[in-house]
Image: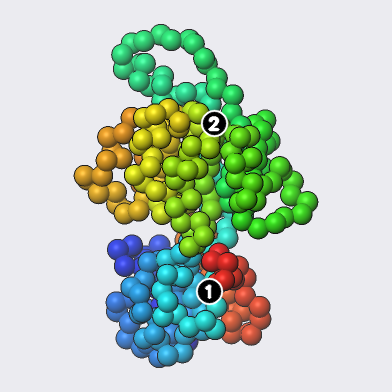
Amino acid sequence: MSLAIICPGKDPSSWIQAIRSIDPELEIQVYPEIKHPESVEAVLVWQHPKGILSDFPNLKLVSSMGAGVDHILTDESIPEHLPIVRIVDDRLTWSMTNYVVMGVLNFHRQITRYQTDQKKKVWDMSQPEIDVRVGVMGVGALGYDVLEKLDFMGFPVFGLGFSEKDDFKFPYYTRDQLSDFLKEINVLICLLPLTPDTEGVLNKELFDQCEPGTYLINVARGRHLVEEDLAPAIQSGQLSGAMLDVYHQEPLPQDHPFWEVDGLTLTPHIASVTNPKAAAPQVLENIKRLKANEPLKNVVNRSKGY
Ligand code: GLV
């Protein structure tokens, strides 16, 4: 049995090292140098070429290198019976929450404004704090941690998810209550999984329902946002700005208008990068469970898309 690592354009060496340090015996093959496709029973993938998994006749497990699985689910050639698992890791959650907290605090304490003022030698003590009420769309492992930590820091928080939830610890809204949710908040964080249902959810119609001056943080997937709707919403003041980590096309093309939009803070999909050392144990644990015919961990529900 071997594990194939398939992550074109990404250096797999830290994954190989992390996996070997736990299980030196496991045979690892790295795409495109797959010499024995018939021995591959598990794959660890990030944006694999679509259709490639059918090269492995004995494949039994598809493991995502990250928390997101949209890059896997868009490959329609993957048979229904093949289990897909994703990374749910405290370290990944911690990084994501830190990034979001930074974005919220930056808005709350206006650090970007002071940086601009500093360049112009401006001393402006007006409005040292903006009152912040935070809404998190997507209340899975990542969204929940953001809610908990911001709540602990004293910010009013609100969650929105696409399914009904009983006994949620924080005020909770479903999609049909979107406009009520938006009325409560002035910072909107997107941590939804990308599914056909959530694609394009950050659009003009939603921005128009926000409190004027709402700040947007998108750390989920670029395709949650209708990109052409963002600059007009900022320029009209409907949004006071946005912090984006994800885009339709990555790397963000040199001629993309976002580079030039005032009020946008852009980062290159680094909000929460899976740490192979932290995540390798769960990849191997699932391979062990697969061999022992035991239930896998963090299995993706294909019909839900996460
Ligand atoms: C990163 O985008 C991930 O899905 O882990």
Q: Is residue 137 left or right of residue 273?
A: right
Element type where label 2 sits in the image: loop
Asked where in the image residue 43 lies, by quadrant, the reply is bottom left
User: Which label belongs to residue 84?
Assistant: 1
Name the amino acid type tagged 2.
Answer: Glu
Can you tell me whether the CB of the residue at mark 1 lies under 8 Å from the nearest atom of ligand 1?
Answer: no
Left or right of 115 on screen, residue 214:
right
Q: Secondary structure at mark 1?
A: strand
Q: Position of residue 282 (x, y in %)?
A: 57, 67
Q: What mark, if any, has residue 211 been given in the picture?
A: 2
Label 1, label 2: how far apart the Cα atoms are? 39 Å
Residue occupying the point 53% across, 26% down: 108
Asked whether the beta carbons under mark 1 and mark 2 sit within 8 Å of each other, the answer is no
| Foreground: disc 1 or disc 2 | 2
**Vertical arrangement, residue 27 with respect to residue 228, above or below:** below
The residue at the point 48 percent across, 80 percent down is 42
Query: Is residue 210 in view from this perspective?
Result: yes
The vertical placement of 262 against 94, above or below, is above
Label whose residue precedes the other's in the sequence (1 or 2): 1
Q: Amino acid at mark 1?
A: Ile
> Quadrant of residue 71 in the image?
bottom left
Of the pair 90 and 59, the residue shown nearer to us: 59
In percent of width and height, residue 13 lies at: 36, 65
